[in-house]
Amino acid sequence: MSKPWPSALASGWHPLAYEAELGSRPLARSLMGVPIVLFRSGAEAAALLDRCPHRNVPLSCGKVREGRIHCAYHGWAFDAAGRCRQVPGTDAVPDVAAHRLSVREVAGLVWCSLAETPAAFPSLPPELDDPDLHSFWWSLDASRARVLDAIENLLDPAHPHFLHPYLVRRKDARREVRVCFTSDARGGEARYDEAQTRLAWLPRFFEGNRTTAVGRYLAPTIAQLAFEGATGPTLTITVVFTPEDQDRTRPFAHFATPRGLLPEWLKRRLLIAFHAPVLRQDRAALALQAATIERFGEPDFHTGPLDLFGPLIWRLANGLPSPPEKRQLQVWL
Ligand code: FES
Ligand SMILES: [Fe+2]
């Protein structure tokens, strides 16, 4: 039997694709183990369970014609609401529908919810829709990772020295950093006063001198890293994590930078080229973590003082209360 999903994920909204990907062909996706087909019907995005109600062939193997999806097996055609509209070879149309899912197009992404009554749509960080910034989505495949572990990984200040040495952090050059951690029922924020830190070459290249780094968690599945220099924000990375399955996660990663000297296309290329090795290293660690947990049957985590976000992520993803909290701590990064 499949394990239950944390309640905030089960009722939540999750991006499955970029709006631009939704064209003349159906798109097969997976959300929390459920196969879904996305297609465009006129101006609207449609999401149905990826199972033809006739004989259960995946609808994503079919074709989209005039806003309807036509099954590849016997050609039954379904509209955006999932209703069967046509059966080739007969005028009679059975009263049958493919199960339709709630779908929204917001911030360039196609979002779905599996819930009959979905939770309120999440309020998204302003950087996702700020015309004054240079910004882009980095299109990424799903990889082996448990979704809450992937979120914790992005917000974790303790692993880069080991997993991304010299790219992100230098373990031979730690400096004392003051951290202010606040959290409430919507998420949490860690502000790192980094004026004294000696950055590795990747952040130095993109940010110059960093004064502050901020990690943010917006429950249930959004994480953000925001960096600031003396003259204001330098780079903001926002990632929405979609749980495709218990140990498969697809990140939707958004980069935003102030308009500056470099043209947008060049910045995009450089940011992707430089973050690709970091992503590979994180993915390798998350895959090992997921494989180990699977071999032992369940996680057995023990939390340390630098694990600022893990407990908050688990609480909020599971719909548990999280009274407002504020802590200051001294760490070496
Ligand atoms: S299985 Fe889809 S039309 Fe028959
Ligand atoms: Fe990392």
Image (cartoon, rainbow, N blue to C red):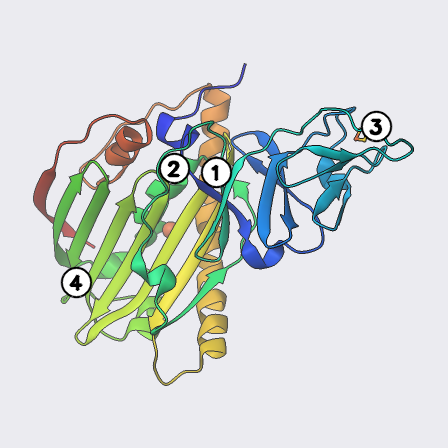
Looking at the picture, how far across and down is residue 49, in whole percent? 62, 32
Q: Which residue is mark 2?
A: 149
Viewer-nearest of discs 4 and 3? 3
What amino acid is labelled 3 in the image? Answer: Ala
* C-alpha separation, residue under disc 2 versus residue under disc 1: 7 Å
Are dots 4 and 1 in contact, CB under 8 Å? no
Query: Residue 159, position in %: x, y?
Result: 32, 47
Left or right of 100? Residue 127 is left
Whole-Å distance between the Cαs marked 4 and 2?
A: 25 Å
Marks 3 & 2, CB-CB < 8 Å contact? no
Q: Is residue 70 left or right of residue 99?
A: right
The residue at the far top in this view is 1
Q: Residue at x 33, y 51 (%)?
A: 124
Cα distance in 3D space between marks 3 and 2: 51 Å
Crowding near the residue tagged with mark 2, few <14, some 14–19, many ≥20 C-alpha atoms within 10 Å: some
Q: Toward the viewer: 35 or 76?
A: 76
First in residue order: circle 4 vs circle 3: 3
- Residue tagged 4: 194
Residue occupying the point 37% across, 26% down: 7
Q: In the rendering, which numbered label is found on residue 92?
A: 3
Could you tell me which secondary element the residue under label 1 belongs to?
Answer: loop
Secondary element at image label 4: loop
Q: Which residue is mark 1?
A: 145
The amino acid pointed to by label 1 is Ala
The amino acid type, in three-letter code, at marker 2 is Asp
Location of the C terminus by quadrant is bottom left
- Work out whether mark 4 precedes mark 2 in sequence or the reverse, and give the earlier one: 2
Disc 2 + disc 1, Cβ < 8 Å = yes
Residue at the (71%, 25%) spot, across then down: 96
Distance of label 4 from label 3 (alpha carbons): 70 Å
